[in-house]
Image: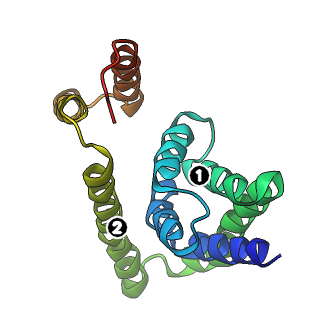
Amino acid sequence: MTTLLHLIYEFFKMGVFSVGGGYATVPFLYQLVNDYNWYTSDQLTNMMAISMITPGPVGANMATFAGFQTFGVLGGIIATFSLVLPSFILVIFVSKLLKKFNENFWIKSTLYSLKPAGCGLLTAVGLGFIKEHITNLPAIMLFIFLLALSFKFKKNPLYYFLIASVVGILLQICHVKFI
């Protein structure tokens, strides 16, 4: 039962502090790898990939997967509910206040400052994943190529994910060690 209570606590906490969307949960999920060993870093990488291609909010998809890895179907349901509950409560109470105080300097400043903080957390985790998981030349070349394409053409990220998937499948068929 302790695991279930920890699951509720951690994902509720994640729901409270992961401001900025589903990807803002990644630093918290990465921390759970170290704190509880509920899943491995490789499983977290797979979780992120699956969450991106699965319909629905990325954060909720990752919570569902992490909860399932930890405590089965019940864990998936509880982790998702625990992650979403703070936002639900907050939206109910804050929506009326924001209408009243949307031009308040302190409110605008606080919301404005949360964006770079979220970007910093995502960058730190992203660099950690790159350092840990991209360890061979084909993976590095693919990453650089897709990054350059994304800056040049500014298409939907799903196109680049599709390209990466096809290249990864071809490299696996050719028995090239990819990651």
- At mark 1, the secondary structure is helix
Q: Nearer the viewer, residue 12 or 50?
A: 50
The quarter of the picture where residue 70 lies is bottom right
Give, as a three-letter code, the residue at label 1. Answer: Met
Look at 51% across and 81% down and name the residue there.
101
Q: Return the residue at label 1.
A: 62
Say what amino acid the circle numbered 2 marks: Leu
- Few, some or many C-alpha atoms within 10 Å of disc 2 (few <14, some 14-19, many ≥20)? some
Which numbered disc, 2 or 1, marks the residue that appears first in the sequence?
Answer: 1
Near-viewer residue (87 or 99)? 87
**Residue 65 x/y as whole percent:** 65, 50
Left or right: residue 42 compared with residue 128: right
Are dots 2 and 1 in contact, CB under 8 Å?
A: no
Q: Residue at x 54, y 69 (%)?
A: 32
> In this figure, which residue is indicated by the disc labeled 2?
121
The location of residue 77, given as percent across then percent down, is: 79, 56
Residue shown at the point (49%, 46%) measured from the top left: 48
